[in-house]
Amino acid sequence: MTPIPEDLPKMQYRFLGRSGLQVSAISLGGWLTYGGHVDDDYAHACLKAAYDSGINFFDCAEEYSGGDSERVIGKAIKRFGWKRNDIVVSTKIYWGQANGNNPVNNTGLSRKHIIEGVAASLSRLGLTYVDLIYAHRPDRSTPIEETVRAFNHVINSGQAFYWGTSEWLASEIETAWRVADRLGLIGPLMEQPQYNMLVRERVERDYVGLYREHGLGITSYSPLKAGILTGKYVEGVPEDSRLGKSGDEWVVGVRERTKGVEWRREMEVVKRLKPVAEKLGTDQAALALAWVLKNPNVSSAITGASRPEQVFMSVRALDLLPKLTAEVMEEIDKRFD
């Protein structure tokens, strides 16, 4: 396994929204990597590097690689003998087609799929509970009361400690809270949205009332927006890169965008951010990640890694936080004008 650099900054921990649970400011997720194009040995090396760097929060979903992401993370926990109380594990329920032969009741947020999906996820992880369980997307075909009751059942049965949402509208989260309050049940503690310099509206505008009223915690994904904010695609998309060759539906969608006007506009913005990173003595990837972590409503930024070195690069973004003064943040915003 790769040794930890001696000069790596100390991990920071933040409370998950208005709860007593502390999660590492930087977390490691299995989307697009573990159980997919990264073999198990490399995946385990990344997970071990993360754990040794102080990362305690590991995220996956029933959908990722047809459940194999959960299996890889579960095997790592067992392989390295990590104490269950030392780590925070999350998974997400919505797309569970891999659970069975008929997708009809293996998708969505019905009581049936939530309860059966959680059981299947725990089996793949080799765990008796996850710390966090997310509704991976809103299910507008299922009554919200059914969904709220089902997630509370999961918590009451000891299979999860907290439940939350991913990519829900603010109004949908508020509705879930109204239902939970009316029934004397637990509402959604955390939301997992995409959040980065190029995608801001929900986190910075739509959810403002939820932070105040319900103590919503943000565990954001894609802080580099599929690598766009690293600057590596400014001159084009390399054919051998993940964006150039991945068959994942989300990545394919991003690849299609490279042909449009919006992509060219984003590349111009990324170019204008380079001098800011250089002035701070860092690279654009670290700048983008530190920018996400500067938001006090972000409990944890979920990162990906296919090599241990990428984990260490993410952790080094913590060194940059004190340098992101109000003046620097204002300068960054001006690059988007």
Image (cartoon, rainbow, N blue to C red):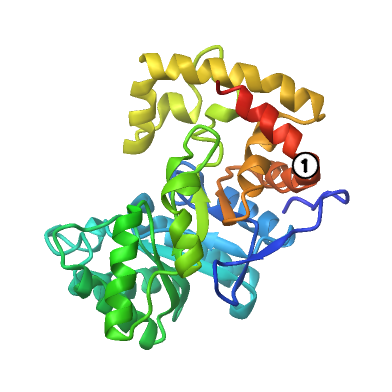
Residue 4 placement, left or right of 106: right
Residue at coordinates 44% horizontally, 41% vertically from top-left? 201
Considering depth in this image, is 166 or 58 the residue closer to the camera? 166
Q: Mark 1 falls on what kind of element?
A: helix
Q: Amino acid at mark 1?
A: Leu
Considering depth in this image, is 157 or 212 the residue closer to the camera? 212
Q: Residue furthest right?
A: 6
Q: Is residue 315 above or below residue 158?
A: above
- Label 1, on which residue? 320
Could you tell me residue 21's position as x and y percent?
A: 59, 74
Residue at coordinates 78% horizontally, 23% vertically from top-left? 278
Could you tell me residue 127's position as x and y percent?
A: 46, 77
Visible residue check, residue 191: no
Could you tell me residue 275's position as x and y percent?
A: 73, 19
Visible residue check, residue 19: yes
Number of residues whose C-alpha sits closer than 10 Å to that of mark 1, classed few (under 14), some (14–19) or many (20 or more): some
What is the quadrant of the C terminus in the image? top right
Q: Is residue 324 above or below residue 179?
A: above
Residue at coordinates 42% horizontally, 46% vertically from top-left? 202
Residue 169 placement, left or right of 73: left
Residue 213 placement, left or right of 165: right
Q: In which quarter of the view is residue 135 placed?
A: bottom left
Could you tell me residue 68's position as x and y percent?
A: 40, 57
Q: Is residue 288 above or below residue 181?
A: above
Residue at coordinates 67% horizontally, 32% vertically from top-left? 330
What is the quadrant of the N terminus in the image? bottom right
Q: Is residue 260 above or below residue 200?
A: above
